[in-house]
Amino acid sequence: MDLNTLWFVLVAVLYIGFFILEGFDFGVGILLPFLSRDKDAAQVDLKRRMMINTIGPHWDANEVWLLTAGGATFAAFPMWYATMFSGFYLALFLLLLALIGRGVAFEFRSKDKNPRWRSLWDWLIFVGSLVPALLLGVAFGNLVRGVPIDAEMQYAGGFFTLLNWYALLAGIAAVVTFTLHGAIFLSLKLTGELKEKALAAARRMWPVVVVVLIGLLVATYFETDIRDRLGLNPGVVPLTAMIAILLAGYFIYKKMSGWAFGLTSVTIAFTFVTMFLIMYPRVMISSTNPANSLTIYNASSSDYTLTVMTIVALIFVPIVLIYQAWSYIVFRKRLTSESHLEY
Amino acid sequence: MDALMLSRLQFGVTTVYHFFFVPLTLGLSLMVALMETLYVSSGREIYKQMTKFWGKLFVINFAMGVVTGIVQEFQFGMNWSEYSRFVGDIFGAPLAIEALMAFFLESTFLGIWIFSWDKLSKGLHAAVIWLVAIGANISALWILIANSFMQEPVGYVINDGRAEMVNFFDLIFNPNVWVMFPHTITAGLTTAAFFVMGISAYHLLRKNNPDLFKRSFQVAAVLGTFAVVLVILNGHSQTQHMVESQPMKIAAAEGLYETESPASFSLLTIGNLQGTEEIFSIRLPRMLCLLAYNQLDCEIQGINNLQAQSEQEFGPGNYVPPVPVIYWSFRVMVGAGFLMLGLAAYALFLVMGDSVENHKKSLHLFGWAIALPYLANTAGWIMTELGRVPWVVYGLMKIEDGVSVVVSWGAALLTLIGFTLVYAALMVATIYLLAKFARQAPPPLDIQAPSAAPETIPSLVGAQE
């Protein structure tokens, strides 16, 4: 494996890590208004706080996966970074606004008692979780489908070019999958009524996710060059994603959330692995002329820079994994209504 | 206004805004870590109360730094994609390393710190905030390594129309990094010190929990004096470096149009409206030589001379940065710096005596002085960044060649307005919350409690407990 391929894999790992981790906290944000329903306003607030506190210690560190993925893309494939970030300009602008609102909202919402203050930030948590999930799904849909790129490596479409039906389907797939992933996470972290509600939400979301993911897989045969890439039989990777989501259903109905959570994580990981496999060795597929595609070779940094970055990654990625794992161990206990709620 | 100007304006707005929060994060993380360490080593509740009070303000400020930081990392690609193509081989690496080495560290451990007061042992909990502080300050190092390449490109070759890295260590040991990094870190500490002194002064005036705020004031006065002295010394070495590496910046900062030997220091220079010529000037003879070279005799290149040199080297064009902006931002920064030196020394003098809380007039002064570090931080960066105009990478790439070609005028305008409005709204919310929690003094600790503070408060200054 050459360094360019290694960095393609590393960038993929960073995005996938991000989607697995931030996936569930996007899901919690999307579920926030729905699972907290109650006649009593004080109960609504308490339920929201409990939900937010399940991801309280983790959401920021989870988001750093996206920052690191962006940074790694810049360092290893500057042309990919430059073309994609300038090309998807308005979409990224919306993504940034959503992430800004959401991040501040977690920190600010419970620091004032005014109900309007709180509902404003709660609304931002919901929108700030839904919009990035949708936009990132749309972005990856476009990456595998291809976008217009000219011979100068510049994006030649507009904002609405990105909103084709295939990419939107990928966006919806991301939203429903993360919502299911988040519901299962909540059922692992809460007790009592909220846990039951989270399980009920997972039961309701699961068939939707199955239908949408099957739809996405079928659509992928029509809208991308998956047949040339992976063959008519796509092989073990997409099938693993499918089997995992089907099995997850069994554990959801059996209320075995730990297994279910592991399986939705596998589903997310293998769905994105499939996407990266379709792309490889291209990083931005040109829909106008295959010769204009950016690849891991014509978009990459020099061998020297890739070598430096490889050494840095070999040292720091394991360290990061260890302390992030520790953070989940510290907060392994379920939250109850008696727990001290920081957010 | 064209798309280039809109993108420049957006970068300016988002960066200045981001840097409202960063210095306090850098400095206050260290101070909170120190307070919690005092709690662990002394076991006294008062230090825990201090840690929690300042920790809450730290966390609010930190959140703003984080979310505005995401924009920073993305907009190189969004608005400056041609710049990113040109320097990506070099500039991407420190950004990625910053994320991997620093962002993960500070974010993960801050999450743990906020939520684990009753889950970790005292010592471990204090270690966690130290990791946050280290992460924050390491992130400053990597971003300054990246920025220093724009100020003073080193360790590269131009290959196929882009800059490629040939020596990673040249990048790290870029002399510009090692004058900027200490200056930034100590400026962060200074910011935190004035923040803590100002808020403590507010409570001392109102006799809220004097024990807590007197100690806080003491800690901040000691650290603040130490930090502001270092800021000035570092600033001095930065000037000396700048004379060599970016002579145009120093000439602009001095409003020095004609080469002078020995060079004088400008106390006040008024130029014409275009900032191209001097009309009136009061100067201290030979002082610029002292500043730049630690000697009384030297020659400092003037703007006109440097412009001619640049034209010879790079072809026709305007190589003069906006002189009035550089000149005044330099003076605002230095002026605020020396005011802070005076105030910090005075604060130290006050805490050496036994009753800070009796000096009511002085305490009022410290409340207002919170603005000074913010003024200096902002002015300092405006001078640093506008001082390299017209270059985005000094001597290698001009700003207009770095802007994204596919971002339309309308899109750039939309995002400029969008970021500005959202940032303005967030500023209101942040100041509201900071003011609210800064005013909420925790009640004094119960005197009956076993770990209560003794009647007389031993001074932190000098006295060893």
Image (cartoon, coloured by chain):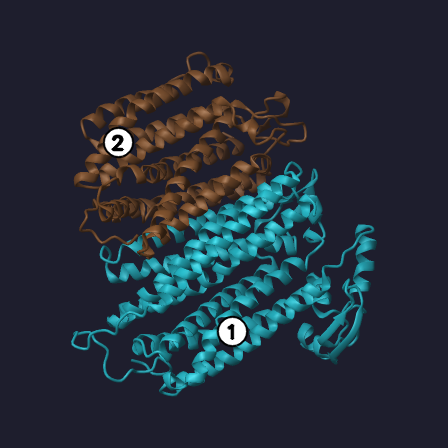
Chain colours: A brown, B cyan
Question: Can you identify the residue that label 2 sits on?
Answer: A201
Q: Is residue B416 left or right of residue A268?
A: right
Mark 2 Cα shell of 10 Å, populated few (<14), some (14-19), many (≥20): many
Q: Quadrant of residue B432?
A: bottom left
Q: Is residue B132 above or below residue A210?
A: below
Q: Secondary structure at mark 2?
A: helix
* Chain label for disc 2: A
Image position, residue B454 (x, y; %): 23, 81
Badge 1 and badge 2 both on one subunit: no
Residue B239: which quarter of the image? Answer: bottom right
Vertical order, A215 against B38 (above or below): above
Percent from the top left, x then y, of residue B178?
57, 62
Residue A311: give its label.
none
Mark 1: few/some/many CA within 10 Å (<14, 14-19, 20+): many
Q: Is residue B243 visible?
A: no
Q: Nearer the viewer, residue A81 or A86?
A: A86
Determine the secondary structure under disc 1.
helix
Residue at point 53% right, 71% down?
B372
Residue denoted by label 1:
B228
Residue at 53%, 53% (x, y): give it.
B143
Give residue B26's position: percent from left, percent from top: 45, 62
Q: Amino acid at mark 1?
A: Val
The quadrant of the rendering that contains the C terminus of chain B is bottom left
Which chain does tag 1 point to? Answer: B
- Residue at horizontal 50 percent and vertical 57 percent from the top: B140
Question: What's under tag 2, amino acid-wise?
Answer: Ala
**In-image side of B413 versus A198 (left or right):** right
Q: Quadrant of residue B410?
A: top right
Question: Distance from label 1 to label 2 (Cα)?
Answer: 56 Å
